[in-house]
Amino acid sequence: MGKENDAMLDYLNNNYRFAALFNGCFFGGEEVVKAAEKETRLSGQSKS
């Protein structure tokens, strides 16, 4: 596979952005994934 896209990883590391994108794409905008309830850790990033 190709290199990771650091800009996209940084953008999606924000829980609210991740939840909004996921809910929009998979649930038609319905708030199923709640940003406050999840810990986002994307590939290539270590837990701080």
Image (spheres, helix red, strand yellow):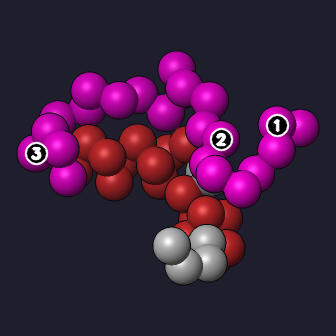
Q: Tag 1: Cα neighbours inside 10 Å, few (<14), some, or many (≥20)?
A: few
Q: Which residue is mark 1?
A: 47
**33 over 27 or under it: above or below:** above
Q: CA distance from mark 1 to mark 3?
A: 30 Å
Q: 44 left or right of 34?
A: right
Check if mark 1's residue and mark 2's residue have beta carbons within 8 Å: yes
Q: In this view, which residue lies farthest toward the top? A: 37
Between disc 1 and disc 2, whose residue precedes? 2
Q: Which residue is mark 3?
A: 28
Amino acid carrying mark 2 in the image:
Arg
Q: Where in the figure is residue 6, as x and y percent of width and height?
A: 67, 73
Span of residues in magenta: 25-48
Q: Where in the figure is residue 18, as x and y percent of width and height?
A: 46, 49
**29 over 35 or under it: above or below:** below
Quadrant hosting residue 21: bottom left
Check if mark 2's residue and mark 3's residue have beta carbons within 8 Å: no
Instruction: Select label 1 or label 3 by which is in front.
Output: 1
Query: Looking at the image, which residue is at 82% across and 37% down?
Result: 47
Q: Tag 2: Cα neighbours inside 10 Å, few (<14), some, or many (≥20)?
A: some
Any magenta on residue 33? yes
Quadrant hosting residue 8: bottom right
Between disc 1 and disc 3, whose residue precedes? 3
Q: Is residue 5 visible?
A: no
Any magenta on residue 34? yes
Q: Which residue is mark 2?
A: 41
Q: In this view, which residue lies farthest toward the right? A: 48
